[in-house]
Amino acid sequence: CPQPHYVREYTLVLLRSQCGSQILLGYKKRGFGQGKWNGFGGKVEVGETPLAAAIRELHEESSLEVRPADIRLAGRMLFQFADETRVFRVHIYTGSRWTGQPVESDEMRPRWFNLADIPFDNMWPDDAYWLPKVLAGQSVIGYFLYAADKVTVLHHCLRNLVEP
Ligand code: 6OG
């Protein structure tokens, strides 16, 4: 059985154009996930809520500003790698209201993608499982166990979070 030694909290923000036909992704220039397209996010700091961390990381990586009421929790994912004892818990938010223009940062190069052209081949493989559901307006919880190669999904489970 997986026995995670510690869980690290992360955030991921996916912004959707107001008409709904495009999604903003960033090309990760360095660090974890380098060379992949992903939403904007990072580690939740001590004493910080995931929502506050999501807003802060989005701003640091893209210059965009969102208000807390303008993003909603769209999912929570647990990611584990077979050769590691840490577990990533990623809080996923979506929104379509912000202020500012996306600006390239040290970490991310932002770009709008049509929903039909999402670059799944250059994203974390788990995204292909859950992102279409989130884009369809569903809220999801999931678990993904990756092999040590960080490419092969050995096991996953994905459930819809039913809103009360
Ligand atoms: P920094 O190192 O930039 O935070 N993240 C993942 N995103 C997806 N889609 N799949 C994964 O599967 C992920 N693992 C981590 C969370 C890392 C950023 O990468 C996300 C953060 O937004 C393994 O501080």
Image (cartoon, helix red, strand yellow):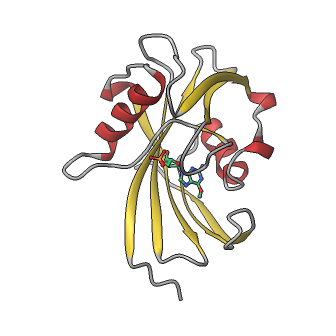
Q: Quadrant of residue 60?
A: top left
Nearer-the-camera pick, 29 or 52: 29
Q: Where in the figure is residue 123, as x and y percent of width and height?
A: 70, 45
Decide: is 149 above or below 124.
Answer: below
Nearer-the-camera pick, 35 or 66: 35
Nearer-the-camera pick, 33 or 1: 33
Residue displayed at 40% across by 50% down? 164
Q: Where in the figure is residue 37, as x and y percent of width and height?
A: 66, 38
Residue displayed at 33% across by 49% down? 44
* 114 with respect to 41 (left or right): right
Q: Quadrant of residue 15?
A: top right
Farthest top residue in view:
100
Nearer-the-camera pick, 74 or 118: 118
Residue displayed at 68% across by 42% down? 35
Q: Where in the figure is residue 95, as x and y percent of width and height?
A: 48, 27
Q: Quadrant of residue 39?
A: top right
